Amino acid sequence: MLVELGHFALVLAMMMCAAQACFGLAGPALGKPHWQSVTFSAVAGQLLFVGLAATALIHAFISNDFSVLYVASNSNSALPTFYRVAAFWGAHEGSLLLWICVLCLWTVAVALRAHRLPPAFASRVLGVMGLVSFGFMLFTLATSNPFQRLVPGALDGRDLNPLLQDFALAVHPPILYAGYVGFTVGFAFACATLIEGRRGQEWARWMRPWTILSWAFLSCGIALGSWWAYYELGWGGYWFWDAVENASFMPWLLATALIHSLAVTDKRGLFKSWTLLLAIGTFSLSLLGTFLVRSGVLVSVHSFAADPARGVFILAFLVIVIGGALTLFAWRAPKLVSNAGFALLSRESMLLFNNILLVVATAVVFGGTLAPLIAETLGLGTLSVGPPYFAPSFMIPVLPLLTLLGLGIHARWRRGGLLHARQSLLIAAGAALLLAAAIGMGAYSSRSVLAWVGASLGLWLILSSLIDPIDRLRRKLSLPAAIMGMSIAHIGLGVFVLGVTLVETTTVERDVALRAGQGAQLAGYTFTYQGGESIAGPNYTGFRGHVLVTRGSKTVARLTPEKRSYWATGSVMTEAGISAGWNRDLFAALGEDVGAGAWSLRLQYRPLIRFIWFGALIMAIGGITTLFDRRYAPAVAPTTDTGTDVAAQRATP
Amino acid sequence: MNRFLWPLVGFALLVIVLTVGLRRAPDKSIIASPLIGKVAPTFDAPDLIDGTRRVSGVALKGQWYLLNVWGTWCVGCRAEHAALLAIHDEGRVSIIGLNWKDDDLAAIAWLAQLGNPYAAIGADRDGRIAIDWGVYGAPESFLVNPEGVVVEKQTGVMTPEIWRARFLTHLDSAAKAAP
């Protein structure tokens, strides 16, 4: 009964979105302010009914209602309660409902802050968001209903995919979606700006915090996914350039460009149409990712169950939403001209390079991801693209990007020039090169040029980001949240670059077969297999091995890799034994029982791998820090910031 | 032309690509490989089970073989495994596995659990060999004749019906030609 109510609530929520879209867009267009106020009631209604629908599905999972097809396919009575809730988004239908929930929460957040915007503008923003929500709800109800009954009901469920029975992956979709879906807000702001043909630049300031917040969520989401892949897939890899991963990475890259372009538009009123195009593009890539992952046009290691009928629907939706927005852009953007100029070494041109390079990087990923499809369309046969393409091609735009970044953050607005920071920059560059050589050759005895270049760039980012905050502290100047956030985010990027570089160039790996008591050497450590025992979990049985890691006579770690067999699906999963340290991971995964009490084992030594996820987290923290800047506080009128004082000129990221 | 129209034009091209991709999505299995009738790409991969040996196309010259691209992460591969075992038992051709973008230990565990139809398995850990072969997605199977020419290909799950209708016929006619 509750399930049917949930289904009905979703239908009502869709009606609410239709009302929100109609009144939100038509009200300002027809000059009927009282229509606009209906929009807010519609948002409240949407929250109520989406909440009901989500509650109904969660209840079905918790109460083991296997007469619901989606529950029967993705849960099991032996599944722990926490994972029963997480099974909500364990497959296509529920993850769409999660998408709807997250979009609903973003809509509510925008509505709560709408009093800071001109009423007509706020109404249009909510109207566009209503349109997007409507599309997703229609999609869910028409092709992917999670409330579908199974008649007769199953006695027990098929169980959640064992790969997903893991904490990081259970919390990963909501965070990832918070980022993905959050770009809808920027998109709606861009559309509202184009509809109104606003000549000013104030919309850039309104849009900035929303974009940065979504970007921060997406950074965390991608990092969590990568962390999960590392310890759960048992391969020891953290990024595979897989179509699904790329689908989340492309919007991230473009959103990064958007954040920087928004800074220029907000500060100087330049790049207006370009910024709007980026906002539309970022959201479009989120939608495109959804299409690629769910329609079956691309084959991926971890794609959803593909269904071409869903593909047709999403494609139609893409055409309406993106095609509509780009038409609006072609029609309105020519009016958004700005005549201000800037010098070659100014902050503006540095951010322009940033944008060009980030767009090229996005294009590299985009091209590689879509190459199989394009080749097929042109009749060139089928092909597949993997890391051998992505890794080197991606470096082409990224290496100059990282080099220029250290300079760009010190360039001044308008007139430009780096003379004022010349000395500090030279010191930072010299220190980075020397330190990188010391780390690469000294600590890891690596002769790889790539390791040296990568480590230098990482250190260069960290050191040059520190120059400004240190300078301000020394001169007893205040440190605004915008500068602090910018420095933190760039330091995070430097940490990330260091991590990736050293993991890629100095990882050591060995596959060995060991009997109890036997040991193997790896990177100065001795891994001794000490036997193992059978284990039984709530919904699986398995084997746990014990591996003692020693260095010299000192015990460093005790690893307990596991091999689990899940009853309901019969699938076998590897749980790697990992000893995490700030500077290295020791990794052991169980392979096969090779007989006579011996097991095959994969052993790895990975330096600085934590830096990769830690760096992403620091970037997100940096982004969130900037949100506390005075400029977003309601009391500050947009006109006070004229950019005349030197401190403020260097302040804006 | 108005430069602000370019994004729309680019998007329209993308939609064409996606539409074509979508139209072909349900029948990926009938996409002909440009490799058919051509000499098979050379390959040389470490043996999955015995890392000291190698699996290469050169060593297979002079005999028929079926190259089967698979991975433990691929649902279709599990579905076709019984068919591969039957082909193995039939004994007409040896099956060479290409373990694509997979974890070696997981792959060995899979074979221990489901049985091993392969005469030898190359480990294509980074997917380079699959790129040469134009692999679109696992599973895929290529039938190669003694001259090293690809004569037939199946994109998607191999079934006994497809094997009899499209693959076995090549072996039969070859057997007739050279009694």
Image: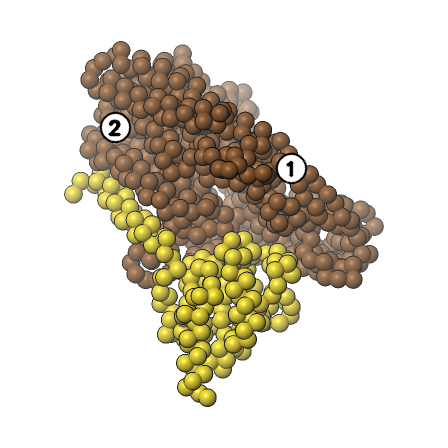
* Display coloring: by chain
Q: At 78% across and 49% down in the image, what residue appears? A: A533
Q: What secondary structure is marked by label 2?
A: helix
Host chain of mark 2: A
Identified by mark 2, the residue type is Leu
Mark in the foreground, 1 or 2: 1
Q: Position of residue A339 (x, y in %)?
A: 23, 30
Vertical side of B132 occupied by B176: above or below: below
Identified by mark 1, the residue type is Ala
Quadrant in the picture for the N terminus of chain B: top left
Q: What secondary structure is marked by label 1?
A: loop
Q: Which residue is mark 1?
A: A78
Query: Which color is chain A depicted in?
Result: brown
Query: Which color is chain B depicted in?
Result: yellow
Query: Mark 2, residues whose alpha carbon is within 10 Å: few (<14), some, or many (≥20)?
Result: many
Q: At 37% across and 66% down in the image, what residue appears? A: B33
Left or right of A520: which side holds A469? left
Q: Which residue is mark 2?
A: A194
Residue B164 shows in this picture = yes
Residue B126 shows in this picture = no
